[in-house]
Amino acid sequence: MTNTTLRVLSYNIYWGGHQQPLERTIEVIGESEADLVGIQENVNREYEDQTPEIAKALGFSYVRHAVLDALEEFGAKGNKLRARWTQQAGQSTLSRHPITAQSPGGSGIQVVLPSGEKVWMFNTHLWHYPYVPYQLLNVDFFEGEAIDPNAHDAEAQAILSARIGHETEINKVLWDIKSILPSGEPVFLTGDFNEPSHLDWTEEAAQAGLYPLKVDYPTSRQVLKAGLKDAFREFYPDPVAVPGFTWPAGIYPDAPDSSVPDPEDRIDFVYFSGANVHVKKVQRLGNVSDNSEISFAEYPSDHRALLAEFELPEN
């Protein structure tokens, strides 16, 4: 049996790559040699979608995804700021290979590889607040109230805050994925989750001083419960030896409190499922100064991109 190699990239390009010329963003994607690219924040500050220009430069096909569709998703009162952001600054997925279908919920695409095998690629960008690591540092950031990491119920408070921020969104994406899983076709999920992983914030990692306490983050738990695996932790299982931070990448120009160093975390993910799908390699793309495995002198985003290389059996 021969195998197919597939490279999947998750990349928050930071407001449509506006910090530097768009060519820098295109260069990062091109250097990755990715076959499938999940882009988050695909619009610039003027809410102009940069996906068509990126795809054209790379010779890729693409589909744009809405994050959420209506104010009703957020209750009777709604939230106009959130609705505008989710509708305008959504995500897009790029593919080197033909796109043949979209998932029922619209957050995924089906792609046919040169081998004839069909795979599914999903992409998401979860809401950016409340951001639990900031809450644990008492950093004033939108609606996130401070959480005392020494409180007896600190972990419970952190879990509740993460659920409030992300449960509705991730459930919608996972419903979409679960509708595809019975097909048996390989599934990939990329995204900026704006929430760390329970696989990272372990008791051992907290004791090592990487994090203020253990937190059993709910969103990563839900993704694994749905049947997906975390590509980075499959390849690097020890969160103390290899934390794998993806954010922030170098200087974060929109940091809410410059007096407090931004806590480093792994909030950008590539998840996968499929019989006999194996992780061959995982690399981060970022600044020369931040020890990324693939580095650039002028990196255009506040997130490191995450590249996972998979081996798939050919039918």
Image (cartoon, helix red, strand yellow):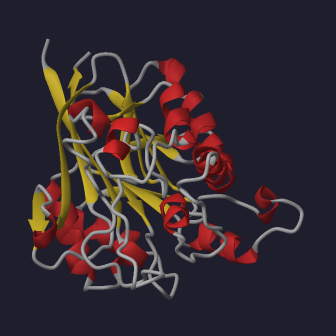
Picture coordinates of residue 247, whole percent (x, y): 33, 63
Q: Is residue 292 left or right of residue 122?
A: left
Quadrant of the image occupied by residue 299: bottom left
Q: Nearer the viewer, residue 126 or 120?
A: 126
- The C terminus, quarter of image: top left
Q: Nearer the viewer, residue 230 or 103?
A: 230
Residue at 31 percent of width and 51 percent of height: 209
Picture coordinates of residue 151, whole percent (x, y): 60, 52
How many numbered markers are drawn? Answer: 0
Residue at 21 percent of width and 50 percent of height: 34
Picture coordinates of residue 202, whole percent (x, y): 40, 38
Quadrant of the image occupied by residue 241: top left
Q: Nearer the viewer, residue 161 or 153?
A: 153
**Placement of 172 over or under 268, stated as above or below:** above
**Placement of 69 over or under 26, stated as above or below:** above
Q: Nearer the viewer, residue 239 or 52?
A: 239
**Placement of 90 over or under 199, stated as above or below:** below
